[in-house]
Amino acid sequence: MRKDTQQGLEPQVQMEESEVEKIDEIPCTSNSSLEDHTRDHGFFGYVGIEAVLDQMRHKAMKTGFEFNVMVVGQSGLGKSTLMNTLFKSKVSRKSCTPDYEEKIHKTVHLQSVSHVIEEKGVKMKLTIIDTPGFGDQINNENCWDPIEKYINVQYEEYLKEELSINRKRRIPDTRVHCCVYFLPPSGHWLRPIDVEFMKRLGKIVNIVPVIAKADTLTIEERLEFRDRIKRDLEAYEISVYPQKEYDQDVEDQILNDKIREKIPFAVVGTDKEHQVNGNKILGRKTKWGIIEVENVAHCEFSDLRDLLIRSHLQDLKDITHNIHYETYRVRRLNEIKMNGIGLSPLMLVNSGSEKDDAGNHV
Ligand SMILES: Nc1nc2c(ncn2[C@@H]2O[C@H](COP(=O)(O)OP(=O)(O)OP(=O)(O)O)[C@@H](O)[C@H]2O)c(=O)[nH]1
Ligand SMILES: [Mg+2]
């Protein structure tokens, strides 16, 4: 995983091996022995650099994390349902009780739902941006426009804040860190609309494609479909997360290769809980049994959740900040420079304007 940190955390000091002055390693048993050791080593002995990790941890815990995930795909593929599954699954079951008992309706506006999830003193504000499905119109041309616009508006907001004279110490981060793209469980190949959509999105955001409603496919169909999608993604040069070119070392590569093997994850969503052997589980009840959403033998929802929250959250944020946002920032600043209009017009574009549900300026 990438080791750079971003806003809210202390920047990591990167040093070449040759520049690093090696300080004797000392066994770290207790505070008192550390103090004794420091005293014994005098000025050139132990200086306690490692304590910076505790400081970073403490600071990160105080500030908390913001993590924003967007769900995109054709209408009726279970985007809103999966969003609820994520909030109701283990990630948040203990820490918050979202009120989602009402029926899920067709999504007609881009809308976001946030929950602060707390685990072992670490706070994370998880925001999921639900988008209306496409594919209902006779002409689906440019159906990616509102999504692209939303993503770019968040970059613009961030840039505006960064360039502001009185900028906030900690810039609120509404940028989309990951876009989960839903593919219909057709068992065929990628459709032209999915190719076009993902090609465009892959340039501005981290995309994680998933096979939606995977319970409608047999095990063989799932594997075969995944294989075809993989070949299509390669053939059309669609950049999906985790991107090979951003693996930082062999360790990263080994870990990410395993994930790349499994992508697109075959997921099943639900917001219903059932009693199974005295335990409450999230599942879809069918005539032939319950499909358990969090059971790895039934589907790969847990893999998706682990990637997003457990193993790659910081990496997704880093790539958003260091690659996607950076690309946007350079382009915008060049545009401003070329037009010879200074920075103020950028501020004017945003200042004083109000935002609609989608975060677009009106
Ligand atoms: N079989 C199956 N059905 C699902 C799954 N997830 C959701 N559904 C059902 O599919 C229907 C549509 O689900 P939604 O979550 O509203 O789909 P959506 O993608 O948000 O649809 P739009 O808002 O129109 O874009 C509902 O009846 C869900 O119960 C799944 O994993 N498997
Ligand atoms: Mg929906």
Image (cartoon, grey):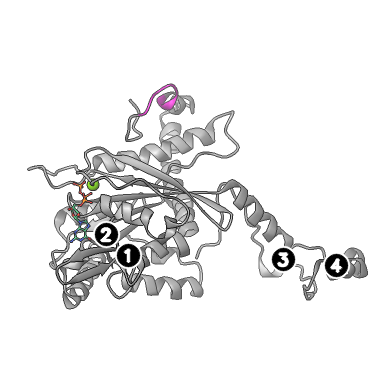
Quick check: 126 left or right of 266?
Answer: right
Looking at the rendered structure, the kind of residue marked 3 is: Glu
**What span is colored magenta in the figure?**
349-355
Residue contact at pointers 3 and 4, CB within 8 angstroms:
no
Quick check: 109 left or right of 189?
Answer: right
Q: Is mark 2 within 8 Å of ligand 1?
A: yes
**Which residue bears the numbered disc 2?**
269
Q: Which mark is residue 32?
A: 4
Query: Quarter-wise, where is residue 234 in the image?
Result: bottom left
Q: Earlier in the sequence, mark 3 or mark 4?
A: 3
Q: Earlier in the sequence, mark 3 or mark 2?
A: 3
Q: Is label 4 in a helix, a strand or a loop?
A: helix
- Answer few, some or many: residues within 10 Å of disc 2's Cα (few below 14, many 20 plus, some between 14 and 19): many
Q: CA distance from mark 1 to mark 2?
A: 8 Å
Q: Is residue 129 magenta?
A: no
Residue contact at pointers 1 and 2, CB within 8 angstroms:
yes
Q: Residue at x 27, y 72 (%)?
A: 298
Can you see residue 312?
no
Residue contact at pointers 3 and 2, CB within 8 angstroms:
no
**Which residue bears the numbered disc 1?**
301
Q: Is label 3 in a helix, a strand or a loop?
A: helix
**Which residue bears the numbered disc 3?**
19
Q: CA distance from mark 1 to mark 3?
A: 45 Å
